[in-house]
Image (tube, helix red, strand yellow):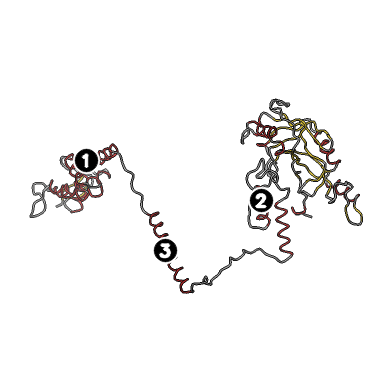
Amino acid sequence: MTTSVIDKPLRRYRSLPLRGGMPKADHKGGMYGAGLIPGAAAITLGEAIGHDQWADSDAVDKVVELGNRSPKGVKVHYAHSSLSGDGIGSQLGRMKNFRREGDKAVGDVHFSRASHRTPDGDLSGYVMDKTDEDPEAIGLSIVFEHDNEAEQAFAKEHTKNGRFSSPDDGNSKNYRHIRLASLPAVDFVGDPAANPGGLFGKGNAIATEADRICEYALGLSTERPTLQHFSVDAERLAQYAARFLNSHNLELRDKPMPVDNTAPAGITNEQLDAKLSAFGTELLGKVSEQLAAALKPAEPPKLTETQLQAQGVERFTKFREVAATAGLKDPDAVAKSWFDKGLNLEQLQTAITPMLVNQNPLTKDTGEDPADPLAKYKAEYAKGRASFMAMNLSEAEYITSRQVDDGAAVLAAGAGVSEAA
């Protein structure tokens, strides 16, 4: 049988921070020589405020036992790491030498050298400075896993007539007694209630996180929130909310905005319509003006005198190249004439044709120069010289091709071109 995620218990829980009574920090002490806070309280006997749980003497002793199991000590972070992250960038060091002092479980926090140069800066230095300057504004919170079997056995032992009754006199509300299975970390945190914004938070972090949880649970967001302030599985809560709505035949709908179509006192509906129409016309005019301004082509950038001169030289050089390629006489003078007239490259084709005709005059009667029977073909080639040269077509090849087209010559196999009979 497959167990849905909503039926699975949460793996890790966090206690509320303990603060106050912090000893002075030794900024050069500790096993790493990078800082030490001796005798810092990890948990205190009593209510875990806001969690409806109770840390009794057995729970305090268990923190000491679990804390001393690892020779390396328990990880200490700058604020709780997220449920999806391992907190590597926020690890400050290790907490060791756990011991019972009165109603508290205390230990020594050894800061690592790396924690002074994390991606977020010198976190350990900040924590030690805060401990020295304002110990009431800083505290520790344990991260632990519940021993559910031990908790259920304890609850069963102290349940009569279906009601649990705590054996601790201070637990008047009969909160659940905590039993720990493991102790992965003890983290420095702030107190949003006593210190708005939190020592290690910004703005209304708790309220914002609560909104994200609700949005995800109710299907208003598909982005699963990363939680730092609440010990709740967002996926489990979303499944519960969906099941609750379905079982009660409920659905979420957007609340309609109220619409008031009545005119204010002292004005008729006709007057109101006229005012709304005038407002709409004015609004449309402003929108049109802004749209026209947005669509207006940008003015070309102003060029310096040096840039203008460089552009002129480049343009004149291009004109001269076109004139020379077309076979015009004195290409320098032609290029200067075009330049002075302000012609562009697209207008040169029109300007070239009459210049070629004047340069190669034909007879008025037949349109051909009787002294040169090939004058017509030469003029045609000169007119389109730039294009023919781009096709690697010489003047002689062009003339031969045109003579064949006009029947003035024929191609004889092996004998080249011969005049037509």
Q: Secondary structure at mark 2?
A: helix
| Residue wearing tag 1 | 320
Give the amino acid type for the residue marked by disc 3 in the picture: Glu
Tell me the residue at 21%/40% (across/down). Answer: 320
On the image, the x and y values in percent for residue 344 come to 25, 47
Q: Residues within 10 Å of mark 3 (few under 14, many from 20)?
A: few
Q: Which tag, 3 or 2, sits closer to the chain's start? A: 2
Residue 318 percent across, percent down from the top left: 25, 41
**Rendered residue at 34%/44% (across/down):** 301
Measured in 3D between alpha carbons, the distance from the residue under mark 1 to the one under mark 3, in whole angstroms, is 57 Å
Q: Is residue 276 above or below residue 352?
A: below
Question: In this image, 340 relative to 65: left or right?
Answer: left
Sequence-first disc among 2 and 1: 2
The residues tagged by marks 3 and 2 sit, at their Cα atoms, a distance apart of 42 Å
Q: Is residue 394 left or right of residue 72?
A: left
Q: Which residue is mark 2?
A: 207
Dot 2 amino acid type: Ala
The kind of residue on which mark 1 rests is: Arg
Residue labelled with disc 3: 282
Residue under the image location 82 percent in, 36 percent down: 64
- Going from N to C along the chain, the mark reached first, 1 or 3, is 3
Q: Of all residues shown, which one is farthest toward the front?
A: 266
Q: Which one is nearer the viewer's eye here, 252 or 343?
A: 252
Write the residue at 78% across / 43% down: 145
Gap between marks 2 and 1 measured at Cα = 75 Å
